[in-house]
Amino acid sequence: MKLCVIPGDGVGREVIPAAVEVLQRVLPEVQAIEADAGWACFQRCGNALPDETKRKISEAGAALFGAVSSPSKRVEGYRSPIIQMRQHFDLYANVRPTKNFGLGEQDSSQSKIDLLIMRENTQGLYAQREYMRGDEAVAERVITVAASARIGRIALEMANARRKRLTIVHKANILPLTDGTFRDAVREEARAYPDVAINEMLVDTAALQIGIRPAQFDVIVTTNLFGDILSDLAAMHCGGMGVAPSLNIGAQVAIAEPVHGSAPDIAGKGIANPAGALLATAMLLQHHWRKPDVAARIERAVVGALEAGVRTPDLGGNATTREVVAAVMSRL
Ligand code: GGG
């Protein structure tokens, strides 16, 4: 088994080696292939995603990516490597789970939180078709029937294997062409899944409901930017961004990544939370390598370490990254 390992920028360089160490403890046969990408990589070699890195990802079929700190101003020749990877490898689904691990603010309704956000990963505003028309700055939001149906199908598959409820989140009252296309394409696919109960929610209502009644959701399917924002919001119920994992899925390649970014404020201090990267690795094991037992071992060990109070500062503790890794290792 091969894994292309791309730490990227900032704390990615701390949490990704930690996750590889844990993975190789449970599966020594995993061969890690290091590759470069990110803003620092761009500054070094003029390319945020070198061809060599794409070749290594293709060869391995699976990758673990850390984080990237793209500048928020246009830089000639630079494109976010994670967006490039999603488009180049046609990673059409971004799977973002939120489970309650007993780490956040608690009340009794929160103990049942187990929701999955299925984010369309190649289109919407992330098509990055931005241009100036006179003094108007325009961003095209691209939604096709084919891409909407494809994310709809995998979301329905996931829902069918879980609690059989799918919520389509959109804003079709304001954007009837784009979001109407998305909603209708998912509903069309749903005809083949009679056991899955379908409902719809406007994105603003969904944000409120994820905040106040998150346990009502099983699987949410939505467009790219809505999924990005809602999954960060949902992460409040699993302990925050340091704990949230994700998996980018395509037909040939899967890339796991913690949801958090490069966190330049704490990079290099040895206190980054490795939980998101570890749980993302578990997702790769479950959905790509089809090793649910090994995935569950890692998840149990991570949750066990956090429950025992071995927590980095973002979770209110004072443990270092290395101390969390040691606590996870001792529970495998
Ligand atoms: N691990 C995901 C990550 O790095 N998130 C921050 C992000 O997506 N940034 C976009 C970018 O900097 O290109």
Image (tube, grey):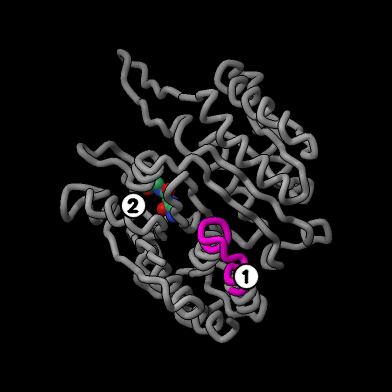
Disc 1: which residue: 293
Q: Residue furthest left?
A: 45
Residue type at the position of mark 1: Asp
Task: State whether the magenta stretch is mostly helix, strand or loop.
Answer: helix
Query: Marks 1 and 2: CB-CB under 8 Å?
Result: no
| Coordinates of residue 12 in the picture (x, y in percent) | 38, 63
Residues rendered magenta in the picture: 285-297
The residue positioned farthest toward the right in the image shown: 108
Using a 10 Å C-alpha cutoff, classify the residue at mark 2 as few (fewer than 14 neighbours), some (14 to 19) or many (20 or more). some
- Of the residues shown, which amino acid type is indicated by label 2? Ser
Q: Is residue 316 visible?
A: no
Q: Which mark is residue 227?
A: none
- The vertical placement of 95 against 7, above or below, is above
Instruction: From the viewer's side, name the closer residue of 219 and 104.
Output: 219
Task: Identify the residue at the far bottom of this view.
Answer: 330
Q: Residue at x 69, y 51 (%)?
A: 115
Tell whether 253 sits left or right of 73.
Answer: right
Q: Is mark 2 within 8 Å of ligand 1?
A: no
> In terms of secondary structure, where does tag 1 sit?
helix
Q: Is residue 75 visible?
A: yes
Q: Residue 243 lies in what quarter of the image? A: bottom right
Residue 158 in magenta stretch: no
In terms of sequence position, does the residue under pointer 1 or pointer 2 come before the other? 2
Identify which residue, 136 or 18, lies in the foreground. 18
Residue occupying the point 71% across, 50% down: 161
**On screen, 188 above or below 166?**
above
Question: Real-space Cα distance between discs 1 and 2?
Answer: 26 Å
Quarter-wise, where is residue 267 in the image? bottom left
> Element at badge 2?
helix
Residue at 62% x, 19% y: name it: 174
The residue that mark 2 highlights is 58
